[in-house]
Image: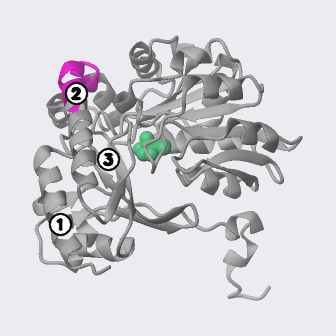
Amino acid sequence: MVIGIGIDKMVKPEILAVSGYAAGKSKEALKKEIEISLDDIIKLDSNENLYGCSPRVQAALGANPYFNFYPDAEQTELKELLAGYAGVSPDAIIAGNGSDQLIEFIVNLFVGKGDEVINSVPTFDVFRFKTQLAGGTVVEVPRDENFNIDVAAIKAAVSDRTRLIVLASPNNPTGTITPQADMLEIAELGLPFLVDEAYVEFSGETMTSFVERYPNMMVLRTFSKWAGLAGVRIGFGIVPVGIADIVHKMRLSYNVNAAAVIAVRETLQDLDYLRANVEKIVQERERLFVELGKLDFIKPFPSRANFVYCSVLRGNASDIKNMMEKKGILIRYFNLPLLQNSLRIGVGKPEHTDAIIRALKEIGEGISD
Ligand SMILES: *Cc1c(COP(=O)(O)O)cnc(C)c1O
């Protein structure tokens, strides 16, 4: 036995081949780069909720004396709470450490080596990432110039290796929603069909009720965005009962922690407050869209989520993102074949819109034609 040969060489090749998923920058990381306090950083790069979570969540977490005990492995109360919120039966509910984890679970249920997943790009990169880690192949079906999906091309992409069709609506990073009729046309194909509705509270149009009618449909939702609980990690899915049973069998007993269960309980007691914040964000999104449109070097796209996607018409999106960071504002930039020279800016409070527009105006003055 030769000592010293790295065991990394023994990792499964399908894992070694995959490029990682790039998450947004943390406030702590930016604080290390520039002179700024954490409270002064405006973080709008990960579609988080700048109104925060319900104050009831904070109080209940601080007061809970039971963190020494594991949460309920059966997730009985959690499933009932989530089912009540979604308006479905608890048997149809799966819960995860963020909906990210549920994407992982669902991909792993259906996709193995050589299998295909149909993905309408550009979209959330986790679909690609998890498919490739499972040894599968992503079949990319491009969206049109306004980022609407191409249903005919999706149908044409189906092969005998297709195991899953995924779709985010509203889509990240473009903010586009897919009309219900298009989603039903895809559902009619009868293949496992995953609709990721991470932003549905901001768009108001959910496919949840169709899961009962289409035994191949699965809908994922999350408390990260609308409920301000991104850091607590709680997502859920509405899936056919048979699939829920299989997910419960394969998941680890405590994949949702006790703090997240408390957070869900308290959040659902404070819906009026949280929905009022969602309404404020939706209004602010429209104002941000109008104000961005007034800048001659930026073209914003209409959004149904809590962010606005923009093409940069003059100048370089990466430079603009860096200059914004120097001013303490974190936003996302892309420069990919289908997301050329573009920015994604989260929607915060009115003062954040003002700060973004002020900063972009200053930056715009320095960009020559
Ligand atoms: C943010 C986001 C998620 C992840 O949500 P978590 O519940 O925080 O894991 C899932 N899908 C899309 C499209 C997202 O943008």
N-terminal of the pair, mark 1 or mark 2, is: 2
Residue at image coords 77%, 25%: 190
Amino acid of disc 2: Leu
Residue 324, image x and y in percent?
23, 69
Marker count (numbered): 3
Instruction: Give the secondary structure at mark 3.
Output: loop
Q: CA distance from mark 1 to mark 3?
A: 32 Å
Regarding ligand 1, which quadrant of the image does it lie in? top left
Q: Is residue 119 above or below residue 94?
A: below
- Residue 116 belongs to magenta span: no
Instruction: Give the secondary structure at mark 1.
Output: helix
Residue at image coords 29%, 33%: 227
Per the rendered image, the range of residues in magenta is 266-277
Q: Is residue 161 above or below residue 355?
A: above
Q: Quadrant of the N terminus?
A: bottom right
> Mark 1 sits on what residue?
361
Instruction: Give the secondary structure at mark 2.
Output: helix
Name the residue nearer the viewer: 5 or 336.
336
Is residue 288 left or right of 352 when viewed as pictured? right
Amino acid of disc 1: Lys
